[in-house]
Amino acid sequence: MKKSFVLLFIAFLFGPGCRFNIDILGRPAIEEVTLLKSPAREKILVIDIEGMIMTSGGDSLFNREGDVLSRVYLRLQKAAEDRLVRGVILRLDTPGGDVTSSDILYHEILKFKKKTGLPVVALMMGVAASGGYYAASACDAIVAHPSTITGSIGVISVFPNVSGLLAKVGLEMKVIKSGDLKDAGSPFREMSPEERQVFQRMIDEFYRDFLDVVYENRKDHLSMDELRAIADGRVYTAEQALELRLIDEIGYFDQALARVQSLASLKAARVIAYTYYPGRQTNLYAAAPGSPARWPVKKLEDLLPELRAGFYYLWLPEIEVP
């Protein structure tokens, strides 16, 4: 039984569906794969941004990709070194993520554009909300799938309160602190009005940053007053987002490809991706295994491992609690 399991395990690791190319240091190496063929030498790179935008979900035996931020950064770095890469399509399917990771991703996209002069087009899939829209704002154009949910411009922070549960089991927390606000946001008691004001001021500051980012990149399409009126945290369909001038076009991959080729002054290009799983990522819609994404979720416990204390550019709708 053990021998059969070991053989099956080895076949899984090194079979044609999941092979690893090893670099000179003995690490699995990322490879280029062709998603759409073309006689042209020039390339358009597709980078998928899936799941929560956070600096967590690192490498494991079955996931060589790491967290979303590091996955995108690695691919932008590799693209910047290839003179045949003439443009990038960021394909987004994400509810957002924490404030810092979303902002870093936004700035890495801007830095890549400045360094290379290459166009970057966002292609929104099922969900590209909050931090997903924040990242898309760094792109030269935004194309949304007809069924995309986007928007959710705003900030949220979640503070669970388990004091009632602890009281039921007879457990009481004793806290010794150096100042009144040292345990602000503690899950072991009710939040005080002073604490709520402190966190609200922080939320308001991050919200202003979000508005500034969107306005800087959409000011040719809408005024700050118009932006504030629609940036109340709600999500929009692709049709609504187009009407509100939050996106540039509704379409599919073909429309995103045509737009990035136009921006790059190309008549044709080969569409590529970078992957650790070349045997499985064989076409535009073949997702590579090992993604750290946990979206969508149906139960609260599915999402809790992703959430840490902090502030989020995140669409966080009501979730079924069993």
Image: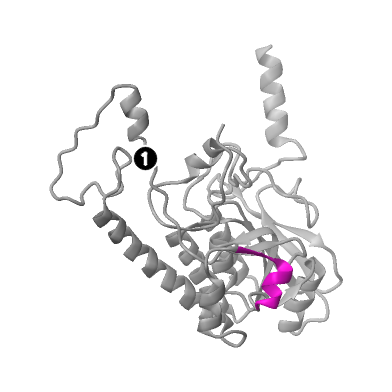
Magenta-highlighted residues: 235-244
Q: Quadrant of the C terminus?
A: top right
Please tell me whether mark 1 sits on a helix, a strand or a loop.
loop
Tell me which corner region of the image, top left, top right, bottom left or bottom right, holds residue 255.
bottom right
Q: Residues within 10 Å of mark 1 (few under 14, many from 20)?
A: some
Relative horizontal placement of residue 103, taking residue 279 as reference (left or right): left
In the picture shown, does residue 51 fall above or below 139? Answer: above
Image location (x, y in percent) of residue 34: 78, 60
Q: Quadrant of the N terminus?
A: top right
Seen from this angle, which residue lies furthest top? Answer: 1
- Determine if the magenta segment contains residue 242: yes
In the picture shown, does residue 93 fall above or below 111? Answer: above
Q: Camera-side residue: 149 or 80? A: 149
Q: Which residue is mark 1?
A: 161
User: Is most of the magenta stretch helix, strand or loop?
Assistant: helix
Image location (x, y in percent) of residue 126: 70, 57
In the picture shown, does residue 308 fall above or below 205? Answer: above
Q: In the rendered structure, which amino acid carries the disc numbered 1? A: Asn
